[in-house]
Image (tube, grey):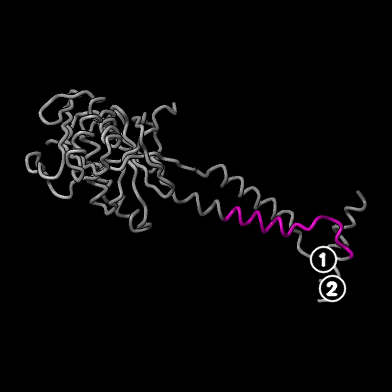
Amino acid sequence: MRLRRRFHTEESHGIDLAPMLDFVLNLLIFFIITAVFVKEFALVVNRPAGIVTTAGAGTGSIPISILGDGEIWIEGRVVDVRAVRPNIERLHAVNPKNGVLIVAAPDAQTGLLVQVVDQVHLGGIYNITFSTSD
Amino acid sequence: MQSRRHTPDSEDHGIDLAPMLDFVLNLLIFFIITTSFVKEAGVTVTRPEALRVEHRDSGNILIAIRENGEIWMDRRPVDLREIRSLIERLHVERPEDSAVIIADKASRAGVVASVMDEIRLGGIKDVSLAAARAGDG
């Protein structure tokens, strides 16, 4: 005890770094705790730059319609979500340059939309444009 | 000069704190820089699941859409018409940022589409739709 007091009063020539170190460590802990490491998984979909009508988008893209009640239409037929992938694989094999245009009803569920986008990705097409039918 | 050299050799009884202080300061600066980048949405939503998803790293602007159509950005609910000006401001601050829309499974596609349009009008072209990796729980 006497030795420590003697050190502080008589022999310390420089600045005492200990309080600064305490403060900096507190700051560090604060920033580590508040740091948010966001790891977001996402799907990339395009939006048409202009106004695209369903009829006018026929060339160069495969239209898929999602209705408000959850029905999915490809080439004039109602298909199941799980049937989107084989359909897309077939159409992709016929014309590999084609993209996909997803036309969703405004009240269609996003969960279904993401499922369809995922199925199209699995079918091999990554150029997906998303538009709504109103 | 002589007195400074004199100090560490003979009179220093404790550990030299300077290297540790350097290290801690570097860590501190690193965390300060990395924290300010993320704009969190501030609300939890049930993400739709997908099998093939891309990993989007930091520096993203997150916009959440709840199942009732509420839009959350930067920890507060915002109006659809506010998004454009907010995005414009963020785009000016950090032009390389990309936006991620975190839409609830049960939200409507129409809301997602209009939010996507507003973000594009605000100047950010890199917009993606968040999904959870299927099977990860």
Q: In which quarter of the image is the N terminus of chain B?
A: bottom right
Q: Which residue is drawn at 92% across and 53% down?
A: A3
The one of A97 and B55 positioned closer to us in this rendering: A97
Q: What stretch is highlighted in magenta?
A: B10-29
Image-based side of B36 in relation to A90, left or right: right
Q: What residue type is labelled 2?
A: Ser
Q: Which amino acid does label 1 sit on?
A: His
Q: What residue is drawn where x is 38% and y is 40%? A: B41
**Tag 2 secondary structure:** helix
Res A45 → quadrant: top left
- In the image, residue A122 sits, relative to residue B12, either above or below, namely above
Is A73 positioned to the left or the right of B32 in the image? left
Residue A120 percent across, percent down from the top left? 26, 35
Q: What element carries label 1?
A: loop
What residue sits right under mark 2 in the picture? B3
Q: Residue furthest right?
A: A2
